[in-house]
Amino acid sequence: MKFAFFPGCVSRGGCPELYPATIKVCQKLGFELDELQERGATCTGAGVLQEKNQFLGDTLNARTFAIAEQIDLPLMTICSTCQGVMSQANRRLTTNPEYLDKVNVHLAEEGLKYKGTVKPRHLLWIIIEEIGIESLKSMVVRPLTNLNLAPFYGCYMVRPSDALEFRLYPEREDSLERVMEALGASVVDYPGKTRCCGFPILTINEQNSVAMVANHTGTVKDLGADAMVTPCPLCHLNLDGYQPKAMQQADRSINLPIIHLPQLIGIALGFDAKEMGLSRHIISAKRMLSKVAVRG
Amino acid sequence: MEVTVSVRRFDPERSEQGSYWQDYGVDVEETASVLDSLIKIREEIDGSLALRCSCRSAICGSCAMRINGHAKLACNTKMTEVVSEENKITVEPAGNMPVLKDLVVDQKLFWDKIRQVSPWIRPVGEEPTGEYLAPNEDMVHLAGVMACIMCGACVSDCTVLEVDKNFIGPAALAKAYRFVADPRDGENRSRLGILSEYSGIWDCTRCYECVEVCPKDVAPMDRIMALRDEAMGQGYDDNYGARHTEVFTQSVSHSGWLNELMLPIKTFGMFNLPAMMNMAPVGLRALLKGKMPSLFHKPVPQVEKVRRLVKKIAAEQKKN
């Protein structure tokens, strides 16, 4: 199956381990990728640009959708924030024909037109909806049976639920747990899994942002988690990169590895730690990897 | 329908034992609300169960509580919509406010924050001889935010209030928007100035919890975003939040994608030594792990098309 792949900014910036890990895992899953950013697609605006100019944000996303329509491929994201922002923009664009016309006037200048047919989907949802849990199980060569893993979705993968079409696709709601279980891991459940990681206010109120990191990682550490798994690289930046600060602020030891979803799938599908870029995390994943006999 | 209602209880007279879960088996109609089940429990099984409710019609806003972990009005939530396959639900008091007894919380924090934003019109100029009238078209967009019934569901589930009780919070900020956007109010500039300070509009994480749980579609977070836009438009742009938005927008408008290295540097200011020193250990750790974004930020292919689009939209928006 071929996808119009939208890697987002962070997988090639602050989390450079995510991009190559995703490419390798997608190859193994039999997915062919046509990269949208190579075709000139822009950042989604991440909800930040939208604070200042929602129309510009929607037009930039409509432009990306129009490029995906041009190559006639379903759109794949690998970031909760990209996914959420695209879903929200798409809802505004596809439920209001007049608005879409207004946006298309601007796209016409470079010969583009968004027809409204794109359904952006995160790799996590694509695995559930296109491969299926049973097929994924059959692909596992290294079951993660010894691992207790805590899910962390990232706000925009769970809210607002109507833009993410949870009513139409109820399996999206616990998709992360189901993929983790299919790979053989045990799920550590806790209420924080759908809460905020604090990243959006990192430059505004670091103390609050870091307190959120300490709460979530500390809670699951106490519940016996070996690692936390996230489909959102922005959450990863905060939960991994600011965990040392969180430990300092909360005056406790946590040291919980934060694993990108594609990295976890990669390990279960037989890749080694280096191929998945697992040595590039701030909090070492070595101990967790040793539990599934992988050298970190 | 036989359901198990698992209630998180707390008895202030035995506060040393903390809160605890208690399961009640109760038989309710298929059409019953969660509140119906709680009232039935109180009347027929356990008279000591404390809860707050009044209108049973989603108007008074008394019965906001966490059902299956998320804030909802108990009267407005059908049992069939929330029970698990094992016919079980969990009910807890609203979050972020101290529990007085069982499902009853002390709403002082909620009301203090509402009062903090001066929730009344402060007109300027000569007093009219009659009412302060406003044209319908100027008020109609406020109908949504005026639908707030002060139930506190948004405050219960706010992710920022969870770590910082000083944050003004979603309900009060939505209320502030209602007055900032009211054409009869004459103090909107000073209101925006106060709201742009620490613990105000820029402290929201944009997590959408408040939008998701609001039973009246007030969408507090969307109002907070509107306040940010309005505040920046009125010149309150010399703070980390506004600069972060500005630098982000410039980066995407210029190169098509985010320059992650320059975003914090430009937000804090290159010569802001304390901020740079604070970031240094995080940056160093990232550098050692090969995670530092490239110094050379390469634009997306055909970036001139993006720049042209951005310019054209900006020109059009300026004209309007």
Image (cartoon, rainbow, N blue to C red):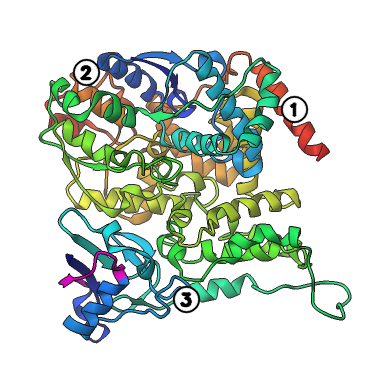
What is the C-alpha distance between the residues marked 1 and 3?
48 Å
Q: Return the residue nearer the eye: A42 or B4.
A: B4
Mark before the other along the chain sequence, 1 or 3 = 3
B24 magenta-colored: yes
Q: Check chain identity for marks 1 and 3: say if they share one.
A: yes
Residue A229, horizontal then vertical, whole percent: 28, 37
Q: What span is in magenta?
A: B20-34
Label 1 in the same subunit as label 2? no
Which mark, residue B60?
A: 3
> How many labels sit on residues?
3
Q: Is residue B176 above or below residue B236?
A: below
**x then y, percent, for residue B193:** 70, 60
The residue tagged 2 is A271
Q: Classify B71 as above or below B247.
A: below
Q: Which amino acid is tagged 2?
A: Phe
Callout 3: few (<14), some (14-19), or many (20+) C-alpha neighbours within 10 Å?
Answer: few
State the residue position of label 1: B311
Kind of residue sitting beneath label 3:
Cys
Toward which corner of the image does residue B224 lie, by quadrant?
A: bottom right
Do tag 1 and tag 2 residues touch (Cβ < 8 Å)? no
- For image coordinates 54% across by 54% down, the residue present is B221
Q: Say which chain tag 1 marks.
A: B
Q: State the separation of the CA atoms marked 1 and 2.
A: 46 Å
Q: Quadrant of residue B318?
A: top right
Residue B108 in the image, given as x and y percentages of width and height = 47, 78
* Quadrant where the image shows the N terminus of chain B: bottom left
Please state the chain letter of the residue tagged with numbered disc 3 in the rendered image.
Answer: B
In the image, B165 versus B276, the foreground residue is B165
* Chain under numbered label 2: A
Task: Determine whether the residue tagged by mark 2 lies in a helix, strand or loop.
Answer: loop
